[in-house]
Image (tube, rainbow, N blue to C red):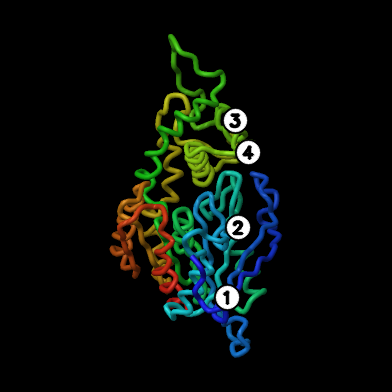
Amino acid sequence: MDNRTPLSRRGQVQTLNFQSPRLADNPLGDPSTRQLAVYLPAAYNNRRYQQRRFPVLFDLAGYTGSGLGHVNWANFSENLPQRLDRLIHQRKMPPCIVVFPDCFTALGGNQYINSSAIGNYADYLTKELIPFVDGEFRTHADRQHRGCFGKSSGGYGAMLHGMKYTRYWGAVANHSGDAYFDFIYKAEWPAVLTALQRYAAPALQAGENNPAAQAQPGEDDGRVQRFLRYCRNSGRLSGMDITVLMMLCMAATYDPDPDASNGFRLPYDLHTGAFLPQRWRRWLRHDPIHLVSRYRDNLRSLRGLYMDCGWRDQYHIHFGCRQLAILLRQQGIKHRYEEFNGTHSGIDYRMDVSLPFLARCLS
């Protein structure tokens, strides 16, 4: 869709390079120098407002995405800078600066928390990018005027940052963020384990069999490493490949261990599919529905907390969002929760609600 906002009311996107000491020598070998796109509203370069400072929003992209992808041309729709131009021009939200970090990894992304198996992306955001942006642009350099938002893994990241890193954020928006791990992640593992059989060695053989459990359940017997090598060398990944990679990324996020193969452990026996409760408990420590009471004071200090989810979400995340909203209410944490008739896909239009909400809370 063409940008109907008048030229004089359109913002601009600047792209900078940032060298990250905290991402240097990360275990996946991902680059530590990243491009950082920053949207500046039209008012930023207006001579009338040359002394004005602006609130800041950080866009946390979903799994397999990057903030840089949100500033690209979009077919039959708006990219995020165009959406911001329109919302600001229509006076539905005050002008703000929006930051688009690149947090992509060799595992397809991350959950915006620190992990010894992936990298310290929470520190990258809070201890590096925030002061860098505040030093480069006319921001209101305090948490009361700074927020983050995202969808899916980005929504999870926004929610976790609203809980654990509240000293940096004054408001957060969570679109369909991962929650209720027992429901949304466990359902994916049977198909993932079956897909990983393709990389077993020796290869599976038909006929009489004498099955046995892994000698070290939760450890990679080589098939995960072979799958990851395939992903690095393949020019095209199937939908199932992406699902397998996503579950391995979650394992690397929630149960990292420098002493384990590939730097993380698995919640299932790769050969028998036996569930490993002791490993799963490590995952649940990061599930938002188990963290509300622990971080209730941090959540209460937020100037704004927005959540929404489609009630036809194909990953069934709406059930976790409902539980999260109930827990927030029980703890007396002010928030806004909405559901809509949609799925997990094609829901960027919901930012027409969340972005004005955040900008008003932070202005």
Question: Which mark is first along the chain, 2 or 4?
Answer: 2
Q: Report which residue position mark 1 lands on.
A: 11
Element on which disc 4 rests: helix
Residue 167 makes an appearance in the image: no
- The residues tagged by marks 1 and 4 sit, at their Cα atoms, a distance apart of 37 Å
| Circle 1 Cα neighbour tier, 10 Å, few/some/many (<14 / 14–19 / ≥20) | many
Residue with the mark numbered 3: 226
The residue beneath circle 4 is: 232
Is label 1 in contact with label 2 (beta carbons under 8 Å)? no
What's the CA distance linking mark 2 and mark 3? 27 Å
Disc 1 marks a residue whose amino acid type is Gly
Secondary structure under tag 1 reads: loop
Q: CA distance from mark 3 to mark 1?
A: 46 Å
Q: Would you name the residue on which mark 2 appears?
A: 102
Point out the frontmost of discs 1 and 4. Answer: 1
Q: Is residue 207 above or below residue 281?
A: above
Compare residues 121 and 60 and report the one nearer the observer: 60
Task: State the separation of the CA atoms marked 4 and 3.
Answer: 10 Å
Which quadrant of the structure image shows residue 300? Answer: bottom left
User: Of the residues shown, which amino acid type is indicated by label 4?
Assistant: Arg
**Residue type indicated by callout 2:** Asp
- Say what amino acid the circle numbered 3 marks: Arg
